[in-house]
Image (tube, rainbow, N blue to C red):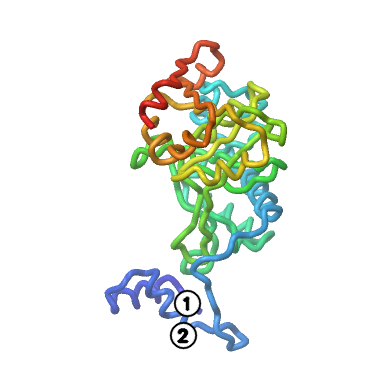
Amino acid sequence: MLVGYSVGLYAKMRKISNDKAFNELLERECFSQDRALLEIRPLNQLADIEIRDKIYRDFLSMLRLEPQHKRCLTNMGFLNSTIENNLYKSVPKNYIKRRIVANNLSKKYNLEGIPGMYQEEDFKWLFSKYNGFFVPVFDANGYIQGLSIHLDKAFNDNQDIWFSSNNKINGTRAKNWIMKSNINEYSTSVILTDNLLLGALATEITDEPVIAFQNITNSYMILKEIENTQIKDIIFLVRGNNNLDYIINRVFRDLIPLGYNLDTKYVSNYKDFFNDNFNVSYNTLNKVA
């Protein structure tokens, strides 16, 4: 069997990374008891959503929401019942804790195809450390598509990243999932936001159709979600003025010539959504575009 020491020694001798050494040793030397070549795929295909939902729900049930993260959600305007129902949980910082959780999960499920989960050199399952909390991304049927992570501090101007294990041993890449609610074929308007927590809050306090996303670089996914509706009015819910240029020039520039009525509502604080007095700037939106 391969062990971590063997991989590390081989890597030092070859002057290569541990991951590369691990893959080379697998190809050359690692066999099961049946003498069949043990194959570890570097990237798995995404598991079906029913499987992802079941595993992620069990995974989150093994975690707790730290007080500072609960305060963060409460300050945003979330009710305790919503925090519980939406399954927000903190990412464990302790390596042993993460290892135990992943190992217990692997005894019950095949974790191949589950974004965020990967194997270490001893073939034990793990997930990475982040300073923040998990945000489940539900589909229209209530299934968890994947997990986002709301970071305590922004990294490279992003405070929300996907829970992914791309480029990890037996890892799986996350997708840019969209969370939507209250949308049907008769919908005439929709609220859009590039923040999943803000989208969840909007869903909690309004019956308006809502689409929330992150890391989308074009409008194709949004257009696909509203193509079979009667939507003509689109409201961009924006966290201050900082990301307006991103929203217009990188994501939704091509919506303007399609005849949609576009408004922007600025939110400097999440609780502002409870107020009726938003800065609506349709003229500014067209000028930027």
Q: Which badge, 1 or 2, comes first in the chain's sequence?
A: 1
What residue do we see at 45% from left, 48% from top? 129
Q: Position of residue 71 (x, y in %)?
A: 51, 25
- Count neighbours of disc 2 (C-alpha within 10 A) and say few if under 14, some if 14 to 19, many if 20 or more: few
Marks 1/2 in contact by CB < 8 Å: the verdict is yes
Residue 186: x and y, percent? 72, 31
Task: Report the number of numbered marks.
Answer: 2
| Disc ID at residue 105 | none
Above or below — where is 40 with respect to 247? below
Residue at mark 1? 2
**Real-space CA distance between mark 1 and mark 2, rounded to the nearest whole angstrom:** 9 Å
Whether residue 182 is situated above or below residue 19 in the rendered picture: above
Residue at left offset 53%, top offset 32%: 259
* Residue type beneath disc 1: Leu
Residue at 54 percent across and 31 percent down: it is: 260
Which residue is identified by label 2?
Answer: 29
Query: Looking at the image, is 100 positioned above or below residue 282?
Result: below
Q: Is residue 73 left or right of residue 159?
A: right
In the rendering, at what x and y percent does residue 9 appear? 34, 75
Q: Residue at x 62, y 32 (%)?
A: 231
Q: Quadrant of residue 287?
A: top left
User: Regarding mark 1 in the picture, which secondary structure is present there?
Assistant: loop
Q: Quadrant of the C terminus?
A: top left
